[in-house]
Amino acid sequence: MVLVSRAVNEPNVRQIVCELFNEKTPSTFDTSLILSTMAQIFQNQKHTIITILLFTLVIQAQYSHQFSKKLSPKSLGLKKQKLTHLHFYYHDIRTTSPPHVVQVAEAATTNTSKTGFGGVSVLDGPLTVGPELTSKIVGRAQGMTASADLNDFGFLFIINYIFTDSKYNGSTLSVLGRNQVLFPVREMPIVGGSGVFRFARGYVLTNTRFFNVSSGDGAFEYNVYVLHY
C-alpha cells in the first residue's frame, strides 16, 4: 500500500483519482480515505481480481512461449533483396597429400557397378579466382558426394561453399542437388546460406575445365547466381 500511496500523491494520478471520486480539486481529497476505499474494494472483489490476474499471467506465459509468430523482415535488419553473381573454380585433387577427396563408404556392388553406385566421398578443396591451382584462393568447398544413379554418372552433391575473401569472409552457400558429371553444363540449386547470404536461394552452373581420367584430378568452373538480402 505504500507504493499505492506514493502513486496516488503524484499530480497526474491525483487528478484522475479526483475525477473517479468526484472531488473538485486534487488538493481537497483525503489520501487515507482513498486508500481505505481501495482496500475495501480489494477485500470485496479479491477473488475476481486474483482470477483476472492469474488469467493475465497465463496469457502472457503462453505468448512468451509460443511456437511461431510473424515477423517483419525489417525487425531482422533485412533490406532490399539483391541478386549476386559469383564466379570461381573448384579444384578436386586426389593426388595431393592429403587428398582433397576421400572415399569413405561403398556398397558390396560398388566396384562392379558401371557407375560406381553406392560410393560415398567427402571433400575439402580450394576455390580460386582462376582455373590454375596457384590462383588466388577465395574459399573452400566442403561436403560429400554419392554415386546415386545405377545407369548414368549422376552424383548427389551436398556441398557448403565457405568464402574467405573480402566482404564474403565467413559467409557460406549450401548446394544440394544432382550433378551429372558427363553433361557439358550442370545446374544445381542453392538451398540456403549464412552471413551475407542469409535467406539465400538461387542456382549454380558448373562445367568441367579439365579432368585427368587416370588420376581423378580435375578443375571445375562455377557460375553462381544467388538472391539474398
Image (cartoon, helix red, strand yellow):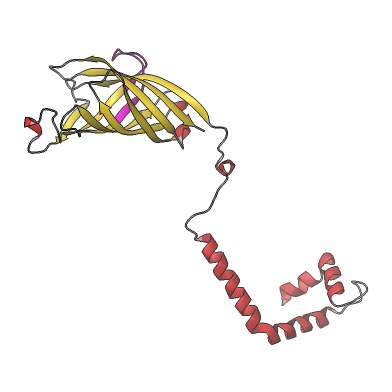
Magenta-highlighted residues: 127-142
Say whether residue 83 is visible.
Answer: yes
* Residue 49, quarter of the rendered image: bottom right
Task: Name the spot of residue 130 as percent of width and height, x first.
Answer: 35, 13
Q: Is residue 166 visible?
A: no
Residue at horizontal 90%, vertical 76%? Answer: 23
- The quadrant of the picture occupied by the N terminus is bottom right
Residue 151 vs 20, above or below: the answer is above
Residue 24 in the image: state x and y as whole percent. 93, 74
Q: Toward the viewer: 105 or 169?
A: 105
Decide if residue 99 is on the left or right side of residue 201. left
The percent position of residue 82, horizontal first and vertical second, equals 52, 28
Q: Which residue is found at the position 7% from the left and 38% from the top?
A: 108
Which quadrant of the view contains residue 93? top left
> Which one is nearer the viewer's eye here, 150 or 28?
150
Q: Is residue 138 magenta?
A: yes
Decide if residue 137 is on the left or right side of residue 73. Answer: left
The answer to whether residue 135 is left or right of residue 117 is right
Q: Quadrant of residue 186?
A: top left
Any magenta on residue 25?
no
Residue at point 14% right, 18% down?
Answer: 215
Which of 95 and 173 lies nearest the eye of the viewer? 173
